[in-house]
Amino acid sequence: MEGDIFSGMGKGTEVDGKVLQTFQNNFVQVQDILDQNRLLINEINQNHESKIPDNMSRNVGLIRELNNNIRRVVDVYADLSSSFTKSVEASSEGESGGSLKSNGKASLKRIRSG
């Protein structure tokens, strides 16, 4: 079943369980950050609607935290993209029929018969 997830990547490409586990862990991490962002946004909105000066001042820190969380999500996705590209390149190096370049396009190799 694990191989089915990435079956469209290329002919004969296999993604091992360790790579899938890394992706799963990173997606869980991103979801946790996004859940935290939802709570931050709700609090920011409540503070804004209250128009209480102390609450409005608190929003400055909350918005900074929200921005930092967004940066963290971007970093995790960048790491995922890099890891994915490396795993595809590593698994396709051994293939004789073709490979998937880092830009996502297939590179076909001609095989000459003896």
Image (cartoon, rainbow, N blue to C red):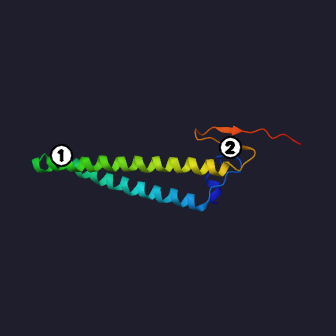
Which residue type does callout 2 highlight? Answer: Ser
The vertical placement of 96 against 17, above or below, is above
- Name the image quarter holding the C terminus: top right
The vertical placement of 93 against 112, above or below, is below
Foreground of the two, 100 or 40: 100
Callout 2: helix, strand or loop? strand
**Residues at badges 1 and 2 in contact (C-beta under 8 Å)?**
no
Callout 1: helix, strand or loop? helix
| Residue at 43% in and 51% down | 76
Q: Residue furthest left?
A: 53
Which residue is disc 1 drawn over?
A: 49
The quadrant holding residue 103 is top right
The quadrant holding residue 97 is top right
- Name the image quarter holding the N terminus: bottom right
- Eye-nearest disc, 1 or 2: 2
Foreground of the two, 43 or 18: 18
Which residue is disc 2 drawn over?
A: 99
